[in-house]
Image: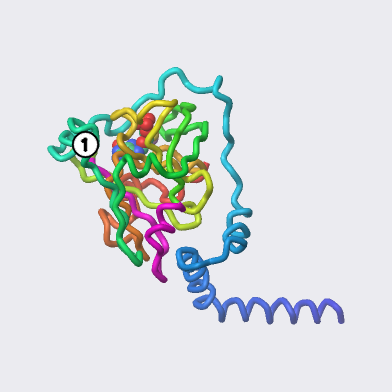
Amino acid sequence: MKLTTRRGLLIGASAALAGCDQLQRSPSAFEFARLGEALSKNGQRLLLSAQPLAREFKPSDISADFRGNGSTSPDSEEYLRHVDEGFANWRLRIDGLVHQAVTYSLAELKAMNARSQITRHDCVEGWSAIGQWQGVPLKALLMSASLLPGARFCIFHCADNLYGQGVYYESIDLFDAFHPQTILAYGLNGKDLPVKNGAPLRLRVERQLGYKQAKYIMRIEVASALTHVGGGKGGFWEDRGYEWYAGI
Ligand SMILES: Nc1nc2c(c(=O)[nH]1)N[C@H]1C(S)=C(S)[C@@H](COP(=O)(O)O)O[C@H]1N2
Ligand SMILES: [Mo]
């Protein structure tokens, strides 16, 4: 009797779930979108408290040399001009599904509250390096632009054309974008980010593999989907078969 009741309940529950499938999908997207609106501090804490931190290391663990991989010296006229000018006229632009597109100079980013973290970078090619990154939490920048309903992803548009095959780009969802260790780094091991490692600004999304860590960021587009950029899979390497979610 008990069993029948339980079975009945289970069937009822799964039927309800199936029926709710569509509905269930939209609230989660909606929930993320609301973050940019005035979601209470407590609400954010609740969401973020479920997010485990990537391991952080000691200064003595820092690798002697953090190698450069993939593009190490973008050769577009525009990028080379920025290098010549010490990135004084470079601007980060955040646009797309935001109330207000915003731009930041490197000096403005450096003046914001910074976060520093010593983490290990793992590349699928089989090497790792530990470095100390300094930068601005992506969350703070997204809040400054204020997200519109429908926002689900951040797409990072980079300055380099990798192997002449296409402009490098990457994307993460808002769950990772609001993670406390997700920063836009302008510093590596206490110095300005070197060109080989992505100057002037690169993403650190610490719970994912190396190819997600977009270097040479020029623009962050907030979007509801990934299909309109590049090959539509959310990143340069994703378009060539890599997983979009590259969790470690
Ligand atoms: N813009 C851009 N970002 C990029 C790449 C690239 O070629 N271009 N390579 C990715 C890969 S595969 C890795 S492992 C890391 C390498 O970062 P590093 O050069 O600081 O070692 O950057 C990632 N981000
Ligand atoms: Mo990589």
Q: Is residue 220 left or right of residue 12?
A: left
Which structural element holds mark 1? helix
Which residue is nearer to you in this view: 83 or 73? 83
Identity of the residue drawn at 37% across and 43% down: 109
> Residue 200 at what x, y percent from top left?
30, 36
Q: Is residue 161 visible?
A: no
- For residue 16, side relative to residue 204 (left or right): right
Q: Where, quadrant-wise, is the N terminus in this rendering?
A: bottom right
Quadrant of the rendered structure where residue 229 is? bottom left
Q: Name the residue under label 1.
A: 163
Q: Would residue 32 appear left or right of 5 to someone viewing this image?
A: left
Ligand 1 closer than 8 Å to the CB at disc 1?
no
Q: Residues within 10 Å of mark 1 (few under 14, many from 20)?
A: few
List x then y, in percent, for residue 28: 52, 68
Give whichever of 160, 42 is nearer the camera.
42
Spot occupied by residue 129 in the image (x, y as percentages of width and height): 46, 26
Determine the residue positioned at 57% across, 60% down: 44
Closer-to-camera residue (78/27)? 78
The answer to which of 122 and 79 lies nearer the viewer is 79
Q: Residue 5 falls in which quadrant of the image?
A: bottom right
Residue 153 on the magenta segment: yes
Badge 1 amino acid: Tyr
Q: Quadrant of residue 56?
A: top right
* Image height of 1 relative to 34, above or below: below
- Residue that extends furthest to the right in the rendered view of this protein: 1
Q: Give the range drawn in magenta.
A: 139-159
Please give the name of the residue rendered at 48% of the width and 73% of the height, measured from the top-left corner. Answer: 26
